[in-house]
Image (tube, rainbow, N blue to C red):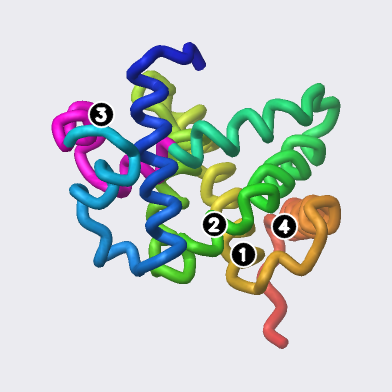
Amino acid sequence: MKHTLNTHIKHYIAQALILLLKQKPFDEIKINEICQKAGVNRSSFYRNFANKEQAIVFYLQLNMLPAFLARQPFTRTKDIFVAIFHSVNDMGDVVDLLYVNDLSHIFLKYIKDCCGAKPVFDDDEAYRTSLIMGLVFGSLDEWIRRGRVQTPDDMADKIGKHLARIGENWDALPDES
């Protein structure tokens, strides 16, 4: 990402919001407080973000995506999942803040922006991408809610095993047990 003055301002705003989120519930944080803590005026906030949620998505993009990309090269699909879980775990304190404040929908928005279907995709690519995005978010969401106890490698292995089992049994009826 090109680091322009505007990018720095967006970073200051997003960072200020995260710092305030550590002190008080999300719904109690006012735009004026964010701007004061960031050292910017209100117009700077609204020039860059429509709302507080967008500022958090920007913060996640700014911090998680580089952590994910730093784990390249990806030689197997498993490597991608391990990198995803590591990048989320590295930001665990922020992710936990989102979940404590009942803001998992913002985390979902971040995941959707990163790896969800795009309007330019044909139907097949859009459905495949949406399936993967749902798998990623669903797995991360449950892992986060359960305290991120398993390692990223363990989670990638679990996902691989479940996907293999689904594939093996795709045409079979579910067990009645």
Q: Which amino acid is tagged 1? A: Ile
Distance CA(mark 4)–CA(mark 1) = 23 Å
Q: Which amino acid is tagged 2? A: Val
- Disc 1 designates what residue? 144
Which segment did they paint magenta? 42-58
Residue 45 is situated, as x and y percent measured from the top left of the image, at 23, 35
- Disc 4 designates what residue? 166
First in sequence, mark 3 or 2: give its number.
3
Distance CA(mark 1)–CA(mark 2) = 8 Å
- Disc 3 designates what residue? 48
Distance CA(mark 4)–CA(mark 2) = 29 Å
**In the image, which is nearer the foreground, mark 4 or mark 2?**
2
In the rendered view, does 78 fall on the left or right side of 134? right
**In the image, which is nearer the foreground, mark 4 or mark 3?**
3
Q: Is residue 144 above or below residue 60?
A: below
At numbered mark 4, what does the secondary structure look like: helix, strand or loop? helix
In the rendered view, does 89 fall on the left or right side of 133? right
The quarter of the picture where the C terminus appears is bottom right
Give neighbour class at mark 4: few <14, some 14-19, many 20+ (Cα, 10 Å): few
